[in-house]
Image (cartoon, rainbow, N blue to C red):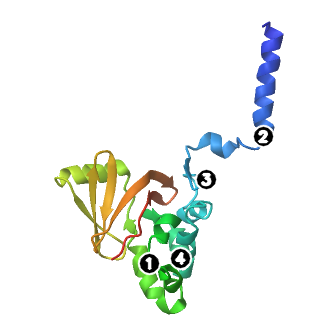
Amino acid sequence: MNTQSKITVLAMVVLSFAFSGKVTAQTMKEKTVMVGGAAMYPSRNIIENAVNSKDHKTLVAAVKAAGLAETLQGAGPFTVLAPTDAAFAKLPKGTVESLVKPENKAMLTSILTYHVLPGKYSAKEIWAAVKAGNGKSMMKTVQGEDLTFWTKGKDLYIKDAKGNSAKVTIADVNQSNGVIHVIDTVLMP
């Protein structure tokens, strides 16, 4: 291939990216993580990212029903343990529908804030705390009660006050005001 052909091919590749709409200045600058089919941008806050995840529609609706969206758009930092829609589907039938009713706002708020740690904790920091705690680490939630973190093999788990365990399925989804760790089970205080 001669020099002119190489330049032509390079120009076509560059133009195809420029006009594809798939590569934007933002995606070129930021390291994103895919959650629920959407890129999560570290420059966006927790709510700005979560609303784009097709796997977190129930969580976003619950956060809005509890009036917590504004808080999770604030400065933080927060560590959010974000149950997927599949995690909410594991709850007894009718639980979610009941929780989002206005008369159950206090209970919903308690459950949701039980999924939030004050401060930003990466998976690496949580692993280190578990190791330092001889296999477990207790962390206080925004709700006020503790969660117990533990590991098994290469996986990080969380045990709630009821003895239920959730597995972190996607760790370290960085946000402008904290971090999200996606989990497979709803935690209950």
Badge 1 or badge 2: first in the primary sequence: 2
Badge 1 or badge 3: first in the primary sequence: 3
Q: What label does residue 20 carry, if any? A: 2
Quarter of the view holding residue 7:
top right
Q: Secondary structure at mark 3?
A: loop
Residue that carries the numbered disc 4 in the rendered image: 62
What's the residue at 56%, 66% (across, down)?
A: 47
Question: How far apart are the two marked residues, 2 and 3, measured between alpha carbons?
Answer: 18 Å
Residue furthest out toward the bottom: 103
Residue that carries the numbered disc 1 in the rendered image: 92
Q: Can you give x and y, in whole percent of width and height, for residue 39 in the image?
A: 60, 51
Residue that carries the numbered disc 3 in the rendered image: 37
Residue in front for this viewpoint, 67 or 186:
186
Question: How far apart are the two marked residues, 1 and 3, measured between alpha carbons?
Answer: 27 Å
Callout 1 crowding tier (Cα within 10 Å): few <14, some 14–19, many ≥20: few
Give the amino acid at mark 1. Answer: Pro
